[in-house]
Image: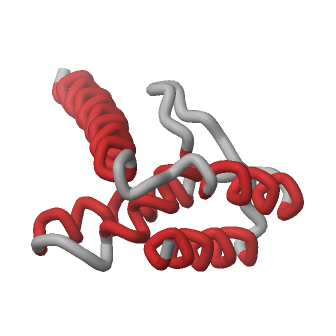
Amino acid sequence: MNELKVGLFAGAIAVALGASPAMSQAGVNSVQCVIVATVHSQAGNENQKKVAVLAEAFYLGRLTGSTEQLQAEFARQVKTITSQNNGEIMNQCARAMNSKIEEVKGIQQALARAQKR
């Protein structure tokens, strides 16, 4: 699948950064999110592209560990993504990312209120 080759390219970038796989607390796989976000960042309408670019950066930032671990995880995860499920995976990744953004905004607002006291 041509789209998945794009995901592997993103994986190569992540490998160059020395990253490794990680499951987020929301139950989404960060490697899967990087793969599908890379694909979605190159297709769809402008709003979808923006979300995908943000998700790609967000999930790349969550990867840690050795190059070997990441290579193995990308190889495993790319096999699980199909043209039938990549949209739902992207939706799950975007929801989890947005949830974390809202959580951080809440923390920032609470800190700002506490400083005003």
- Marks counted in the figure total 0
Residue 84 appears in the figure: yes
- The colour style of the image is secondary structure
- Residue 104 in sight from this viewpoint: no
- Is 1 displayed left or right of 39 in the figure? right
Residue 32 higher or lower than 35, as above or below? above
Question: What residue appears at the point 12 percent right and 66 percent down from the top-left corner?
Answer: 47
User: For the point 51% across and 61% down, which residue is it?
Assistant: 35
Q: In the displayed structure, would residue 111 be above or below residue 65?
A: above
Quarter of the image that includes the C terminus: top left
Q: Tell me what residue is drawn at x 38 percent, y 52 percent.
A: 86
Identify the residue at horizontal 71%, vertical 72% (top origin). Answer: 17
Q: Quadrant of residue 106?
A: top left
Front position in the image: 41 or 101: 41
108 lies left or right of 117: right
Where residue 3 appears, x then y in whole percent? 44, 73
Q: Find residue 83 and report its horizontal and vertical position in percent.
A: 38, 57
Residue 86 vs 115, above or below: the answer is: below
| Residue 59 drawn at (x, y percent) | 50, 53
Of residues 18 and 87, the one nearer the viewer is 87
**Is 90 left or right of 30, judged from the image as shown?**
left
Asked which quadrant contains residue 37, the reply is: bottom left
Q: Quadrant of residue 67?
A: bottom right
Q: Is residue 56 above or below residue 84?
A: below
Query: Residue 56 appears at what percent x and percent y?
Result: 43, 62
